[in-house]
Amino acid sequence: MSRLSAAALLTLALVSCSLEYNQIDEDGERSESTPDTILYDVTNTIVSGNTPRFIVRAERAETYGELDLQYLEGITFTELDASGAVITEGSADSAEYDIESENITITGN
């Protein structure tokens, strides 16, 4: 690889990256308002007794591990009975998923 090509790749890599330093507070700790992960186009399946019971698909999911919460945007959901038949289907603007209790609160259209 020539020096010009290597320099061009390095420049492209540096230009395409961005860092947000404001997510760390004065003590060097990450703020609770900063998600641990952000995922796009995700599917979360809640299983009971080896049977899928609830399927939630989201355009975006932010996980806050210390709070045991996940915030979902642009969701669709499907509730299944014990045999796998669809009981309820729908969509909503957003939802808050409590990771520990597996309760979900859906809001919006």
Image (cartoon, rainbow, N blue to C red):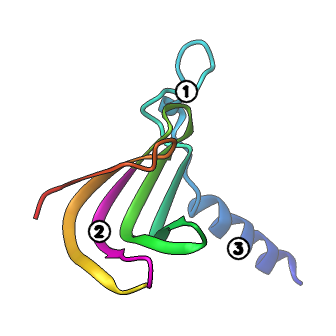
The residue to which callout 2 is attached is 75
Cα–Cα span, label 3 and label 2: 41 Å
Cα–Cα span, label 1 and label 2: 30 Å
Front-lying residue, 16 or 75: 75
Residue 20, percent from left and from top: 51, 40
- Report the magenta residues as a range: 71-83
Q: Nearer the viewer, mark 1 or mark 2?
A: 2
Residue 19 can be seen in this image:
yes
Q: Secondary structure at mark 2?
A: strand
The residue to which callout 1 is attached is 24
Find out whether residue 12 is within the magenta segment.
Answer: no
The residue to which callout 3 is attached is 8
Front-lying residue, 3 or 93: 93
Q: Residues within 10 Å of mark 2 (few under 14, many from 20)?
A: many
Quadrant the C terminus occupies: bottom left
* Drawn side of residue 50 relative to residue 100, left or right: right
Q: Residues within 10 Å of mark 1 (few under 14, many from 20)?
A: few
Residue at the extreme left = 109
Q: Residue at x 63, y 19 (%)?
A: 28
Q: Secondary structure at mark 3?
A: helix
Q: Residue at x 76, y 69 (%)?
A: 7
Q: Note whether 95 is above or below 74 in the view shown.
A: above
Q: Note whether 17 is above or below 82 in the view shown.
A: above
Amino acid type, mark 2: Ile
Q: Residue at x 45, y 68 (%)?
A: 40
Front-lying residue, 30 or 97: 97
Amino acid type, mark 3: Ala
Q: Nearer the viewer, mark 3 or mark 2?
A: 2
